[in-house]
Image (cartoon, grey):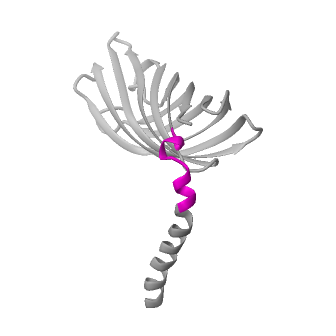
Amino acid sequence: MKAMKFLLPGVVAGAISFAAPAIAQESFASHLYVGANGGQGHWRAMCPSGSSCEDISGTLAVFAGYQINPMFSAEASFRNYGELKGHNAAGVTSTIKGKGWDLSGLAAWPLTDWLSVYGRLGIYRSVLKGDGALIGAKESNFGPTYGAGLQFAINKSLALRGEWQGFSSMGGSTLPKGDLNVLSVGALWQFR
């Protein structure tokens, strides 16, 4: 076991020294990309009890990523989740609005030279605020996010995306608990 403690750093240092010339040939910026998407969010199981719900709303997001290699990327995004409105029998409206950050890893599989399918797995942090009958209620959550989509490359720098992404276990003690599912379309620009 002690030999492994000394051997492992040596192996890592050797691998880095052999890989350094190849890494140096490509610039860091050529792996970066930015984009935006918009779509429709469906708030599932978050309607206050005894209420009818308007649980579908528009969502918007901006994101930035780093393409590690043709198959794997890391991505960070900020999303406005939109809002959920509930109306009880007495006519009182309850509203929940949200926004949040997420960090994800993406794995892509090319179907053709210009079309690929990808999967997403990561973590989100959301902030939800209540209004109307829920005024003053606020929840911050961490949880898993996951999704799948298609990416269509228009050229080497510009691509279009269509995606489904889920955010699990939003809400909590002061706001109803549930999930958010988002269908979106967007575009990204890679700095090549």
- Residue 173 falls inside the magenta stretch: no
For the C terminus, which image quadrant?
top right
- Does 21 appear above or below 14? above
Please give the name of the residue rendered at 42% of the width and 22% of the height, measured from the top-left corner: 82
Closer to the camera in the image, 54 or 107? 107
Q: Main secondary structure of the magenta part?
A: helix
Residue closest to the far top: 91
Please give the name of the residue rendered at 25% of the width and 29% of the height, measured from the top-left corner: 137
Closer to the camera in the image, 60 or 69? 69
Closer to the camera in the image, 25 or 43? 25
- Does 183 appear above or below 147? above
Quadrant in the rendering for residue 108: top right
Residue closest to the far right: 112
- Does 21 appear above or below 183? below
Q: Is residue 55 visible?
A: no
Q: Is residue 149 left or right of residue 121?
A: right
Q: Which residues are magenta?
A: 21-32
Please give the name of the residue rendered at 50% of the width and 25% of the height, measured from the top-left corner: 41
Quadrant in the rendering for residue 84: top left
Please give the name of the residue rendered at 62% of the width and 29% of the height, measured from the top-left corner: 159
- Residue 31 falls inside the magenta stretch: yes
Q: Position of residue 124 (x, y in %)?
A: 41, 42
Closer to the camera in the image, 40 or 62? 62
Q: Position of residue 113 (x, y in %)?
A: 75, 38
- Does 178 appear above or below 58? below
